[in-house]
Amino acid sequence: MSPTSRAKRASRAQLTAAAVAAGVAALIVGATLAGAPDEVGAATESSEQPVLRSTSVCSYVGGEPDATSRIGVFAIPGVPEPPADAEADSIPITALPLAGPEAEPPEEPFASLAERGVRSLTEASSTEVESYAVRAEGRLGPGVAAEQWSRGTGTDLRGLTTGSCGSPGREFWFVGASADAARRARLVLTNPTATPAAVTVSLWNENGPVDVDGTDDLAVPANGQEVLLLEAIAPESAQLAVHVQASRGRVVAAIDHRETVDGESAGTSMIPAAVTPTDTVVLPGVPGRGSRSLRIVAPGDNDAIVEIEVLSPDGAYKPVGLDVLTVPAETVLELPLDEALGTEPTAIRLMSDEPITAGLRIADAGEEGRPDVAFTSAVAALPGGALASVLGLDNDSLDTTLVFSAVGDAGGRVLVRTVDGAGVTVDEVPLEIPAGSTQSVTVTRPEDSSWTTTIVEVAAGNTLVGARIIGGADDSGRWIDVMPLAAPQTTVPVPNITAELTP
């Protein structure tokens, strides 16, 4: 390793150690506690209180003449709410485009939602690509799920793209992008706060770390964004891992990925954020069809010895000949898995002696027409309680499947409820999932729409991972997208204050 690389690695390690951890699903929250002027507050054990405000960002939406884009917002019913008052009770969820600190705010919100349990679905018809901030306060602050959806039908842009709108954080990892002539990826850094942010972007490919000028302390303006073309800063990289670390402020990071074959679009996808490298990771929602390639990054100084386990409908198994592999230090390794996987959705568990994280690329070409591409990533186990899948589809060419894999020793339980446009439950499916196995449920449309919204109630935390798969075909070819499930934050720990009178 060069001295420059060692210096950069040391600097990044210091940043990581100094930063406050905030996972991909963390929401901006705030609470104010005030005591009497003559009292000193003594903190004891904390208690969980409903969040007072939350923000999420739908990155890189719209702006394509041959694509239709939408944003869906859903406030999960039945979650704890802050105490109602006249001001807070009148604040709806609003989504505003992020245009930078110099831009005039729009006279009207892009969309709004003032009722729990009823989905808001709005077309993003701007002629320019934009990011949208979804902000919720007061009684509607907890449990807000936001998603973006796009379907391109042109020669230059064809594919199905969905994704959870991300929450501001200090650290993001992505594995699976490529930056060569046929595959283009954009790293979108969005700052939805009123404070400027600074981030460092680190990259690894199949050959090692990628040293790039201009990616240390990159400024992201308040209420604005920066877009990095990965094919420009890491050209000819077949496999890429990206680490975004904020040294000041918070951002939302996202990767928009597009592929071509012979000059025509061969699929689009958002690459989901992956967990921070650790010794055991799970990738949910691996479809039972298409070309499936696992990509693993070992960003540390030592080679990683990795065991692979498939969580199938019939239980866990280790693929013959692929159960153990070595990922060289500071590189991204690609491993085709088509022969190791069956025709039913599964999950992949990786166990390593060194910290790793991972992504999986799915290319579905079908027998006729044009292909599409999708990605899933290593994610954290779901907490207990409710989450939502907002923008599924069930029509003549597409269907939606929710896939759950049990990662705990005792298995897991989940209840999937489909609601209609008025928020009324029209279907319920309970699942009992044995340890080390995967089960799926196909979501059927309600009568009032081909769009499907489901409320997922997880019985116990840290027992399941989940994903949504949308797939199908029409005369133009295949469609596929995978979105790992994540739970929006509903509560935040608040220290209990014991009053101590001043003598």
Image (cartoon, rainbow, N blue to C red):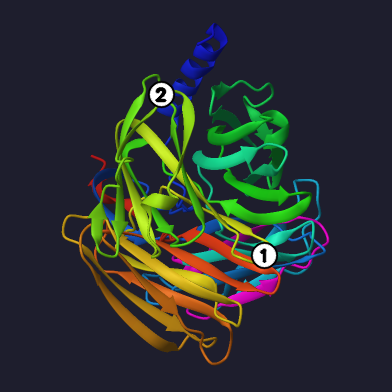
Vertical order, 371 against 233 (above or below): below
Disc assigned to residue 222: none
> Counting other residues with Cα less than 10 Å from the Cα at mark 1, is it few (<14), some (14-19), or many (20 or more)?
many
Could you tell me which residue is drawn at 21 percent across and 55 percent down? 408
> Can residue 75 be seen?
no
Q: Which mark is residue 150?
A: 1
Q: Which residue ends up furthest to the top in the rendered image?
A: 3
Q: Position of residue 442 (x, y in %)?
A: 43, 77
Which mark is first along the chain, 1 or 2? 1
Q: Is residue 129 magenta?
A: yes
Measured as percent of width and height from the top left, residue 312 is found at: 30, 60
10 Å crowding of disc 2: few (<14), some (14-19), many (20+): some
> Judging from the image, what secondary structure is the residue with disc 2 in?
loop
Q: Position of residue 121 (x, y in %)?
A: 63, 75
Q: Residue at x 62, y 59 (%)?
A: 372
Q: Is residue 457 left or right of residue 226?
A: left
Look at mark 2 in the image and give the residue it sits on: 300
**Observer-nearest of 210 and 245:** 210
Q: In the figure, 99 relative to 433: above or below?
A: above
Q: Is residue 278 visible?
A: yes
Residue sitting farthest toward the left = 410
Quarter of the figure that contains the C terminus: top left
Q: Nearer the viewer, residue 467 or 307?
A: 307
Q: What residue span does the magenta drawing correspond to?
A: 117-143
Residue type marked 1? Ser
Query: Along the line of sight, which residue is nearer the eye, 168 or 442?
Result: 442
